[in-house]
Image: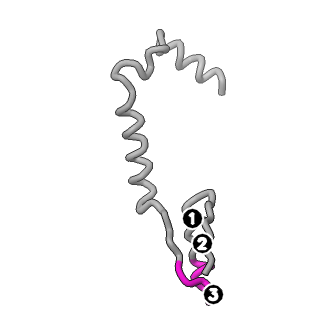
Amino acid sequence: MTALKITVDNQQNALMLMKMLRSMSFVKEIVADLPTDKADNQYDGLKKILNAIEPGTMFSEIKDPVEWQKQIRNEW
C-alpha cells in the first residue's frame, strides 16, 4: 500500500477532494487533519494574538486618533 499527503489551500477544497477520493474504489483510507469548526479556530487564533499583545501598546503609534482617521479616509 502507498500513502500520499496532500495540502490544499482551504477547507472547502479539502472537503471536495475528500468526497472525490471516497468515490474511488482503490482508495482504502482517508485521514484528514481538518479544523472542526472554522469560525471557532479563527476566534481562538485571534484571541491568542490579542492576548499576546501587551496592554496599552496596540495603538501606541497613533498620537492623534482624529487626525489618523482623517488620513485613513483620504486614502480611499
Residue that lies at the very extreme toward the right in this rendered image: 75
Report crowding for label 2: few under 14, some 14 to 19, many 20 or more residues within 10 A (C-alpha).
few
Assess disc 1: are there few (<14), some (14-19) or many (≥20) residues with their C-alpha within 10 Å of its C-alpha. few
Q: Position of residue 45 (x, y in %)?
A: 42, 44
Most extreme residue toward the front, as rendered? 1
Q: Secondary structure at mark 3?
A: loop
Say which of 3 and 14 sits in front. 3
Asked if residue 22 is positioned above or below residue 32 in the image, the reply reads below
Q: Which residue is drawn at the image coordinates 36% and 23% (left, top)?
A: 54
Q: Which residue is mark 2?
A: 16
Distance from disc 2 to disc 1, alpha carbons, whole Å, reads: 6 Å
Assess whether mark 1 and mark 2 are in contact (beta carbons under 8 angstroms): yes
Picture disc at residue 12: 1
Judging depth in this view, the residue of 75 and 36 nearest the camera is 36
Mark 3 crowd level (few <14, some 14–19, many ≥20, 10 Å Cα): few
Dominant secondary structure, magenta: loop
Q: Position of residue 22 (x, y in %)?
A: 57, 82
Please state which amino acid type lies under the numbered disc 3: Phe
| Residue 4 is covered by the magenta coloring | no
Q: Report which quarter residue 53 is drawn in.
A: top left
Disc 2 and disc 3: Cα gap in Å?
Answer: 18 Å
Tag 2: amino acid: Met
Disc 1 versus disc 3: nearer the observer:
3
Residue 28 lies in the magenta-colored region:
yes
What's drawn in magenta, residue-wise?
19-29
- For residue 59, the mark is none
Q: Is residue 26 above or below residue 4?
A: below
Residue 66: x and y in percent read 48, 14
**Label 1 vs 3, first from the N-terminus:** 1
Numbered mark located on residue 26 in the image: 3
